[in-house]
Amino acid sequence: PRVHSGGATRGRFSTPFSARSRLEPATSAVMGPGLAMASPPAPVARVVTDKASATPRIRRVATRASSSPTAGRRVRLGASPSPASTIASSHASRRVRPAAASLLDDPIEARPPNEPSANLLNEDLAPVAPAQRTFTTYDIAALWIGLVVCVPAYTLAGSVIDLGMSAAQGIACIAIANLIVLAPMVLNGHAGCKYGVPFPVLARSAFGVKGANVPAVMRALVGCGWFGIQTHVGGQAIFAIACAALKLSTATVASAHFIPTLGISSYELLCYVTFWTAQVAVVVKGIESIRVVEKYAAPVLIVLCVSLFVWAYIAAGGLGAMLSAPSAFVVGGPKEGQFLSVFLPMITAVVGFWATLSLNISDFTRYATSQEAQFKGQTIGLPFFMAAFSFMSVAITSCSAVIFGTAVADPVALLAKADGGALTTAVAMGGLLVATLSTNIAANIVAPANAFVNLAPSKLSFRAGGIATAVLGTAILPWRLMADASGYIFVWLIGYSALLGPIAGIMIADYFLVRKRTLDVDALYKSGEGTAYWYEGGFNTRAMWAFAAGVAPNVPGFALSAGIVPAAAAQSLRVSFPGLLGAFDVVYGYAWFVGFFVGAGLYLALMRGESRAGENEEVLYTA
């Protein structure tokens, strides 16, 4: 049987009871009728086999009560005399569970928590049982296709050309970055699949039951910003469709009805609100409606991308211009010797682009049917399709320079310039709407909505959290953020990656190295002294210090890049302390990586010797 310190006993082999009853002298304390009342459980016997011979013997293994600071740790009490005569007659069909399964072999252990605190649980935060899971390998891959094929990803890929890279350098840069970010995606997705919990609940293990609100809200605020950016892109697509249908110039209409205080025209704002409303309508129907949107949007997006690529290829007379365009960083080029100063920050920017999803990917893998489904789906969907989409983006941007005389990295502006007629423009912009919708509701609403729910589970629902996300995403005036490409990459993408990198490092270190992939589901939903993840008043101060230490090295570089330090003062500092400010720039260029490794390393050091309190390991009889 499998004996848990909580008092539950489950059969693990099919031997007759008469065979098992011979162990009763050593195990009567835990196998008798009073098992549920035993606290703490008495030592139990474990049958092992000597390496030197085939003679079985018994070692005693004890688990301690969950209230103990060393709960769940196995303790050897010594070996008892060999009972070969009594064990030999037992059947050889006993099931043996491996001591350490591989990542993909870990079973799904999602179940309802026992006696949860009312203020930590509602139906949106509860573990998703295996019977409720619907995300197969195809669904996970389709989710990623919907996430990858979006205007910001297109703009990001096209920006490498604007920064001076050749097509080969740009595509290689993006491919390398996506292979790097795949690792935290799969690792953080593991816990979500195994225990069926969303990101804010998973964060309770490392940061504490209350402390989890800190990373969750930070992730939520970044998601709100992204929601606004993507909604602005969708609004621009609707604006372009409307102008094409009425045979009007988008530039003329925008300038004639411009609102200086907002930085946008009234008609563009109306289109923004229209697309905003359409997304909220999907969100209020729940997570299943999001899965359906992603499932059917993926093939449509692939067809539209290929169609745009074919058009650009034919109109430009091939890819010769793209393939022959030299890098600006070659000898004699305008940016000679500056390649690494652009390449490395660009790697960080691309990693930062997906840093949000690398944190809350468990919000989706909790619906995966198996670990294999989440692993294969992500491996197929992210690096492969992102590399393919980036190639198309770079190729189309390069071809646009031949077609129009200047490179156009914005697909909305490109389609407006193409002027293929009202019908063609409407179809193309409709494709952009599908791409933006599929990305926005999955990447930028689910995580913030769950984070807001985690603040007050008894009062807020997923729908209310989604609406709050949409409102806050509009309040930041996202169209201003998208106006400058360098600000988009070096301030927005790298800036928030400096915040999210330490969180990712701490969570991965906690789950894989401190907890050994074992969590106490009950404790994730309990508050109060004596519970495993309460720490100091609900906050794990060691995680908080590790987070602060991971962010700190990037603060000076962010202040310089974001213009927080006035330009004149920054220039004066660079003259007075060139080496120091140069170091700040270098560190900031690696913001996500610096934060990840500093946060993870300090967290592990501070948690050294910490018992895995509350994570009760089961005791098995094996033969």
Image: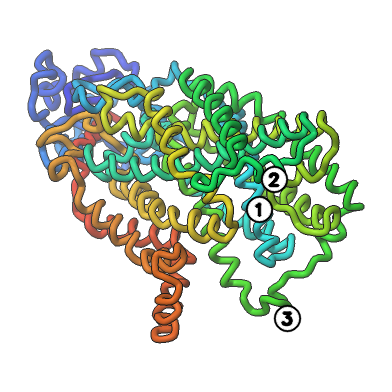
Assign a secondary structure to mark 1: helix
Residue flagged by tag 1: what amino acid is it? Ala
Q: CA distance from mark 1 to mark 3?
A: 24 Å
Percent across and percent down for residue 577 are 39, 84
Assign a secondary structure to mark 3: loop
Left-right relation of 571 to 138: left
Residue flagged by tag 3: what amino acid is it? Val
Total marks in image: 3
Q: Which residue is mark 3?
A: 331
Percent across and percent down for residue 361 are 46, 38
Assign a secondary structure to mark 2: helix
Q: In terms of image quadrants, where is residue 79?
A: top left
Q: Which residue is mark 2?
A: 389
Q: CA distance from mark 3 to mark 2?
A: 30 Å
Residue flagged by tag 2: what amino acid is it? Phe
At x 73% / y 70%, what residue is drawn?
327
At x 26% / y 29%, what residue is drawn?
456
At x 37% / y 48%, what residue is drawn?
508
Q: Is residue 154 above or below residue 123?
A: below
Residue nearest the observer in this picture, 138 or 419: 419
User: Are the residues at dot 1 and dot 2 in contact (C-beta closer than 8 Å)?
Assistant: yes
Taking the image as drawn, is residue 502 in sight?
yes
Q: Which residue is mark 1?
A: 157
Q: In terms of image quadrants, where is residue 250?
A: top right
User: Are the residues at dot 3 and dot 2 in contact (C-beta closer than 8 Å)?
Assistant: no
Q: Residues within 10 Å of mark 2 (few under 14, many from 20)?
A: many
Quadrant location, the C terminus: top left
Considering only order in the chain, which callout, 3 or 1, is on the residue closer to the N terminus? 1
